[in-house]
Amino acid sequence: MSKRNFKDIQDGTKAVWAGEKESLAYNATQVPVVLSVAYNYDDVDEWQEVAIGNKPGHIYNRMTNPTVQAFEEKVRILEGAEEAIAFSSGMAAISSTLYTFLRPGDRVISVKDTYGGTNKIFTEFLPNIDVDVTLCNTGNHEEIEAEVAKGCKVLYLESPTNPTMKITDIERMVRAAKSMGALVIIDNTFATPINQNPIQLEVDIVIHSATKFLSGHADALGGVVCGSKELMKRVYHYREINGATMDPWSAYLILRGMKTLKLRVRQQEKSAMEIAKYLQKQKLVEAVYYPGLETHPHHHIAKKQMKGFGGILSFVLKDEMEAIKILLPKLQYANKAGNLGAVETIYGPARTTSHVECTLEERKALGIPEGLVRISVGIEDTEDLISDLEQAFSLLESQLPVNSSK
Ligand SMILES: *Cc1c(COP(=O)(O)O)cnc(C)c1O
């Protein structure tokens, strides 16, 4: 078979075929899970050539593994990057990337509502090694520009953000950072490569928690970092030595999940829009956050830089925890859990999910209301998800009369 060329090929086709080898042992059609930790070489010269990278091949699984490489290649092609490096989790990908590029005395600028774990790296671990961290108000572009203009090594972004779905104008931030020679890194987990390709907007490094939408089935942890060959050489070196590499079984599960990525995302965002509109009409709901709604303050930016608005939204219940504790158990076609991006719909309050690491005061300071519930919409039929909400809200209203709410 001639080598597959992905030029002018759509994302749905890439998700299925990218990274899949042209020929596999035994004419297998599926990428094998290679569990062998090491690889045998009788020819010491050949072994040496592979070990120093002059010849393709594998030496030891902490460095490279065929199954993990197939996953890296699929993500690389979907993100339009020169290189992709897989990690054991999204947090391993994020921390390893930050530790690759930041040294004591460097300055990093980010936003306040990055993923909870990322926020902890900024507030707890980077200050430990004397990295100067500035966290701006998410979505306040003028503030970020003013901080970047003072100089920084790295500008770290996430868009949309967890859990209030704020959007940052990527092109505008790249312009500001490039004028100061800063490296721009973005966590693209929520958007997925189906809806947002930051490398086309000249972002240097794109990171995913592969545990979420890429996998789609909530049964494997993983992370991935994409960028230029030059930058990824350094990220790879950090991983090969520090060791947070992806497990071949996880690589296989995520590869399998990724084949349906586009189908899943399109179904999830179709339902997310309907659910957002439904929630807006509920008396017990104080606010709904979804970038697809025209009432979202950054809808115009989302429309400009995203191909779709994604499968995550959140809403705020008026009676806060009291209402959450009544509503969530009544939902039948949803897990109440801490993950997102799966085929099943998932509900979770910020205090047990995205911001579990924060205290009540810290969540307040970050502008995360206690009544906030995040929904990661699954691939179930839209009508069923709406009916499930309808029955849960009518039971909630019978237990918490609308006029009694704050
Ligand atoms: C889950 C998540 C992470 C962390 O990924 P893990 O695979 O859980 O380590 C990072 N960023 C975002 C936006 C996430 O949703």
Image (cartoon, grey):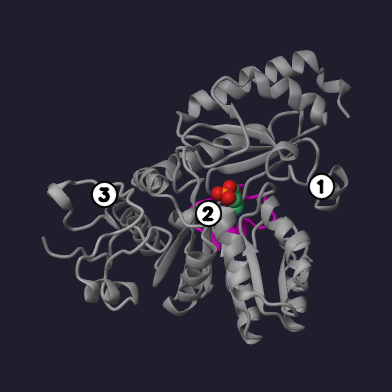
Q: Mark 1 or mark 3, which has the lower sequence index?
A: 3
Determine the CA span between mark 1 and mark 3. Answer: 43 Å
Within 10 Å of disc 3 (Cα), the crowding (few <14, some 14-19, many 20+) is many
Q: Mark 2 or mark 3, which has the lower sequence index?
A: 3
- x 64%, y 73%: residue: 173
Determine the CA span between mark 2 and mark 3. Answer: 26 Å
Q: Amino acid at mark 1?
A: Arg
Q: Mark 1 or mark 2, which has the lower sequence index?
A: 2
Q: Which residues are magenta?
A: 293-309
- Label 1: element kind: helix
- Disc 2 designates what residue? 191
- Disc 3 designates what residue? 31
- Label 2: element kind: loop
- Above-or-below relation of 381 to 368: above
- x 36%, y 43%: residue: 260
- Mark number for residue 363? 1
Disc nearest the viewer among 1 and 2: 1
Q: Amino acid at mark 2?
A: Ala
Q: Is residue 264 magenta?
A: no
Q: Amino acid at mark 3?
A: Val
- Above-or-below relation of 393 to 181: above
Q: Position of residue 56 (x, y in %)?
A: 26, 70
